[in-house]
Image (tube, grey):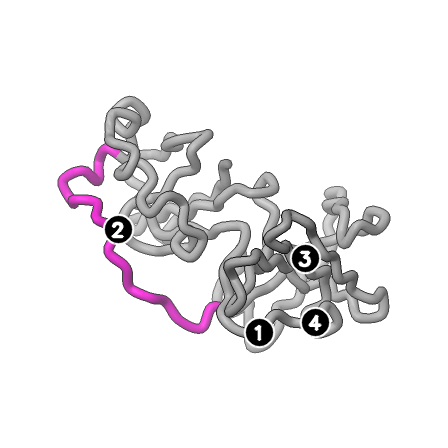
Amino acid sequence: MLPREVLGEDLTQAPEPTKQRPIRAWISGSVPVEHSMHGELWLTGWQEHDDAVPQHLSPAYFDFDTFYALPDELQFPDDFESRLRTKTGGVPYWCAASGPAEVPHHFEYLLQIDSGILIQGRLPDPSEIGCDVYVYHASGEAEIRRVPSATKRENAPWSVNQNPDQADGYYVEFANFGSDGTAYVFIHREATPPRVIFFWNR
């Protein structure tokens, strides 16, 4: 995570290499390549949504036993609808396998980032977006549109997927939080400077 003033405009440059070993990742079915960052995706706006979680139940989302005593529709609002798994405000949408994480009480929930996001519009060509594109048909078969080596980009998404029911949109996977996990950010606002906790689970 970088301070806002370091980000600047346009694409964010990856930090200088350190003595730590870089992440080795399988990209587009090729041989392992060295990557120093996740793909970049700019959010240009947020859509307000009521998660139907009563405010008096908010503390239950931070206690393992109390959380799992809630009805399923409150544990997992909207049944993991992909458009709503990247969100800010309200309560965390915890992953089903992990449940609530232990966070120090003086940290408050800030936001969460899913490993991908649903984008409205025309499915891009692999050369445009810089990664492989997977089109899943109603028969269950997958059409793989490979990105040419010359147009692969390090800051490209990991992959792009389109399901049969997504004719007007597609799913962009831009991070690998344990393959299909979600990252969570908590903030301690009273600390100087404010402290932030970042972790993921699935």
Mark 2 is surrounded, within 10 Å at the Cα level, by few (under 14), some (14 to 19) or many (20 or more) other residues, namely some
Camera-side mark, 4 or 2? 4
Lower sequence index among marks 2 and 3:
2
Q: Earlier in the sequence, mark 4 or mark 2?
A: 2
| Secondary structure category for the residue under label 2 | loop
Q: Assess whether mark 3 and mark 2 are in contact (beta carbons under 8 angstroms).
A: no
Q: Is the magenta stretch mostly helix, strand or loop?
A: loop
The residue identified by callout 4 is 125
Closer mark to the observer between disc 2 and disc 3: 3
Q: In this view, does 84 lie above or below 197?
A: below
Identify the amino acid type marked 2: Asp
**Which label number is shown at residue 134?**
3
Residue 130 locus on image (x, y percent) = 72, 67
Horizontal and vertical percent position of residue 43: 47, 68
Part of the protein shown in magenta: 43-60
The answer to whether the residue labelled 4 contacts the one labelled 3, judged by CB atoms less than 8 Å apart, is no
- Residue 23 sits inside the magenta stretch: no
Residue identifier under label 2: 51
Question: What x and y, as percent, mark residue 44?
Answer: 44, 73
| C-alpha span from label 2 to label 3 | 31 Å
| Residue at the farthest top position | 65
Mark 1 or mark 2, earlier in chain: 2
33 relative to 55 in the view: left or right: right
Calculate the distance from the C-alpha at mark 4 to the C-alpha at mark 2: 35 Å
Q: Which of 166 and 26 is in front in this view?
A: 166
- Residue at left offset 38%, top offset 52%: 111
Q: What residue type is labelled 1?
A: Arg
Q: Which amino acid does label 3 sit on?
A: Tyr
